[in-house]
Image: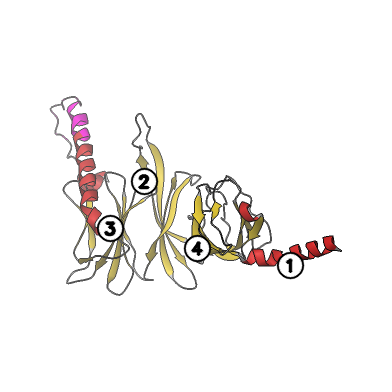
């Protein structure tokens, strides 16, 4: 009888213990494109009465992904979940995890995602409620193949591809950029540049450093300007407004592309922040000057032209 009472007491305590730690899963957006980075946000609330430690074991956090056809999406690589952190009593902790490319959600439709957390101190294993996201398709507005060599010594040039895509969801129309290899087998980056108006086409140019410049209208009198690097990173993001003139892209003397016309407006989501912008400009200018110097050195090594009339040199615009 005494043993039975102990068992019943333990069973009564289990729900109470589970209630002491709460876990939930959320996402910043409802819809994503295939191969876009999907950042899962796990929130842990601790009311256990003591400090809890997480992130010391590789299996402390796991995810399961299920498609709308009730099939599990296979995990193709390990998730990066390591990193010790503590949550004090009555405290809250957040761990953000990139689900791509560990899980490839490339087919259009809805996906149900659940996270499972282990709490060794309480001998608990808890799962969040399922969170749903959708994978959308997009129309390719423009694409360009380009040659690029990484900054590593002795690296050989390779062919990569820029794509601008427009995705229409229930709530918005978004402009996306995708950087991949020539055959679209390796994807280096897919992300939204922001909302775009339904009319008009975004301006786009590739500079002598193989950076992609995009200027597009996202409101009645507002524009968004972005620079994307060949490795898939977003280098710059700015807001421009229509003033007496419309902002547009122009090729500068140093082979760099800039925005002329319109009015520059500082924004909370600028990349980089306004205090870092001058540093980025100087670094890009140094890279452009170095590239021009290498071209001049290559030209100086060429043999002297014959007595025939020389060809007209290509302009900077044609070299892009």
Tell me if residue 282 is in the magenta stretch: no
Q: Nearer the viewer, residue 282 or 258?
A: 282
Instruction: Name above or below for residue 227 compared with residue 160.
Output: below
> Relative to 261, is 93 on the left or the right?
right
Instruction: Name above or below for residue 297 compared with residue 127.
Output: above
Which residue corresponds to the image point at 68% horizontal and 57% vertical from the top-left? 71
Closer to us: mark 4 or mark 3? 4
Q: CA distance from mark 4 to mark 1?
A: 25 Å
Q: Nearer the viewer, residue 2 or 143?
A: 2
Point out residue 6 in the picture as x, y percentages from the top left corner: 79, 62
Point out residue 89 in the picture as x, y percentages from the top left corner: 53, 62
Which badge, 3 or 1, comes first in the chain's sequence?
Answer: 1
> Relative to 204, is 184 on the left or the right?
right
Marking on residue 91 = 4
Q: Quadrant of the N terminus?
A: bottom right
Magenta segment range? 294-310
Question: Do callouts 3 and 2 mark residues in contact (Cβ within 8 Å)?
Answer: no
Mark 3 residue crowding within 10 angstroms, few (<14) / some (14–19) / many (20+) = some
Marking on residue 230 = 2
Tell me if residue 300 is in the magenta stretch: yes
Which badge, 3 or 2, comes first in the chain's sequence?
Answer: 2
Point out residue 162 in the picture as x, y percentages from the top left corner: 39, 50
Q: CA distance from mark 2 to mark 1?
A: 58 Å
Mark 1 residue crowding within 10 angstroms, few (<14) / some (14–19) / many (20+) = few
Query: What kind of element bears circle 1?
Result: helix
Which badge, 4 or 3, comes first in the chain's sequence?
Answer: 4
Q: Which residue is mark 3?
A: 273
């Amino acid at each position: 009888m005494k043993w039975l009472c102990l068992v019943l007491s333990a069973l009564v305590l289990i729900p109470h213990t589970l209630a002491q730690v709460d876990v939930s899963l959320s996402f910043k957006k409802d819809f994503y494109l295939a191969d876009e980075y999907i950042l899962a946000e796990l929130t842990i609330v601790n009311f256990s009465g003591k400090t809890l430690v997480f992130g010391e074991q590789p299996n402390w956090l796991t995810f399961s992904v299920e498609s709308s056809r009730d099939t599990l999406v296979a995990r193709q690589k390990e998730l990066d979940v390591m990193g010790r952190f503590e949550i004090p009593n009555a405290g809250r902790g957040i761990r953000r995890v990139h689900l791509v490319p560990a899980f490839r959600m490339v087919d259009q439709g809805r996906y149900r995602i659940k996270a499972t957390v282990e709490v060794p101190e309480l001998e608990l294993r808890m799962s969040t409620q399922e969170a749903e996201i959708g994978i959308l398709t997009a129309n390719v507005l423009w694409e360009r193949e380009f040659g690029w060599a990484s900054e590593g010594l002795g690296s050989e040039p390779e062919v990569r591809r820029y794509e601008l895509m427009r995705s229409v969801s229930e709530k918005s129309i978004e402009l996306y950029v995708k950087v991949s290899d020539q055959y679209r087998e390796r994807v280096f980056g897919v992300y939204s540049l922001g909302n775009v108006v339904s009319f008009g086409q975004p301006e786009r140019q590739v500079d002598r450093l193989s950076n992609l410049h995009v200027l597009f209208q996202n409101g009645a009198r507002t524009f968004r300007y972005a620079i994307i690097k060949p490795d898939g990173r977003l280098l710059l993001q700015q807001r421009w407004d229509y003033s007496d003139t419309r902002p547009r892209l122009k090729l500068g003397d140093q082979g760099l592309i800039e925005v002329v016309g319109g009015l520059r407006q500082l924004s909370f989501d600028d990349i980089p922040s306004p205090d870092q912008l001058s540093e980025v400009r100087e670094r890009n200018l140094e890279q452009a000057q170095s590239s021009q110097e290498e071209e001049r050195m290559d030209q100086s090594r060429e043999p002297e032209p014959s007595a025939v009339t020389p060809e007209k040199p290509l302009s900077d615009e044609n070299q892009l």
